[in-house]
Image: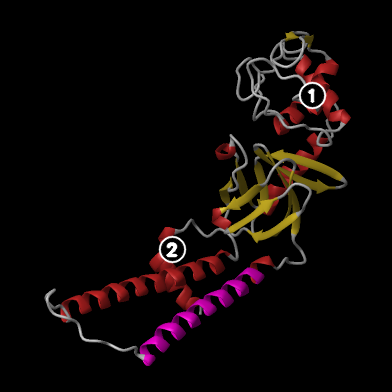
Amino acid sequence: MRFLGDILQTLFGFTLPDQAAKNAHLVDDLYNFIMLISIIGFVGLMGVMTFFIIRYHRSNNEKSAYIPHNFLAELIWTVIPTIIFLGIAVWGIVSFNAMEKVPDNAYKINVTGKQWMWEFTYKRNNMEVNVANVMYVPVNTPIILDMTSVDVLHSFYVPSFRIKRDTVPGMTTRVTFTAVKKGDFKVFCTEFCGTSHSRMRAIVRVVSQERFDRWLNREVKEANISDPVELGLRTYSRNCATCHSVGTDSIIGPGFQGLYGKTREFSNADSVTADDDYIRESIIAPNKKVVKGYPAKMNSFAGLLSEKDINHLIEFIKTLK
């Protein structure tokens, strides 16, 4: 069976991304089989049509003879496609169940989709490490992703791994894979999630086990940092950088440079001075005061950022003179 799969992959594999995960061939084999059946069906149908056009051509003045139904022909073109379609369905179910089976030794990574970025959370020695838009995984190690979303529907898709799964607010979805090739592999969001949907990309970086351990140990050490400004920078990078620059440039919302202590003008409220309370309110209830000249598009981070996270972010913003 694998021999036939290799032949089909040779014929049609050029139409697909590289196989970089253990079970990617399960998807490719079914896809390649459907491609083969489709080509055979198309060529066969066109050939039969051409034959009948030439063989039974008559002038428009002649009346065609009455042709009753043919039971054998009707039976063939009903039974054979039914068998093919049922076979494809069973094949798909078997392949799906095989890809959904989670190995006992799978390493768990938490994935959070948010407008408009992916956040990956690792746990080691009772410490959590959060990384934005780059997910490190060791090669030849089973991985299980526990995924959710904090705002709207997103969909986590890695073409080279042949995995795709929706992330849903208030719900945990799972997908598993085992990367078999080192390198960087693209991650896309395939569920339209807002104005910057097309920019919601990430990378799965597959490395050796030794390099993965060194990277994670370094990240764990950095997670012990207590400097509020540095922690605020990390909070900004994970949650704010998509929409707000650290300079004066506008992305979707206004830049943060010179924000603290500045008088802010709003389209729906009286002006105020940007102090701790204003920044905290802007994070918890962003549409209560909308900065003049900008749309009311920001989602509330209530429940998503802790009070410590907000305080660290305020300390970081204070440094952006």
Q: Is 262 on the left or on the right of 35, as rendered? A: right
Q: Position of residue 61 (x, y in %)?
A: 12, 76
Q: Which quadrant would residue 35 be assigned to in this image?
A: bottom left
Q: Is 157 on the left or on the right of 105, as rendered? A: left
Question: Could you tell me which secondary element the residue under label 2 belongs to?
Answer: helix
Quickly name the residue at label 2: 13
Q: Which quadrant would residue 281 be assigned to in this image?
A: top right
Q: CA distance from mark 2 to mark 1?
A: 48 Å
Give the residue type that dot 1 points to: Leu
Say whether residue 249 is magenta: no
Say if 90 sits above or below 240 in the image. Answer: below
> Which residue is the extreme one toward the bottom?
72
Q: Is residue 54 visible?
A: yes
Question: Could you tell me which secondary element the residue under label 1 belongs to?
Answer: helix
Q: Position of residue 301 (x, y in %)?
A: 78, 32
Residue 313: which numbered mark, if any? 1
**Do labels 2 and 1 touch, CB within 8 Å?**
no
Q: Residue at x 74, y 51 (%)?
A: 109
Give the residue type that dot 2 points to: Gly
Q: Position of residue 86 (x, y in %)?
A: 54, 79
Say if 288 sits above or below 299 in the image. Answer: above
Question: Mostly what secondary structure, the magenta segment?
Answer: helix
Q: Residue 233 versus residue 153: which sits nearer the camera?
A: 153
Magenta span of residues: 71-97
Q: Earlier in the sequence, mark 2 or mark 1?
A: 2
Q: Position of residue 219 (x, y in %)?
A: 76, 39
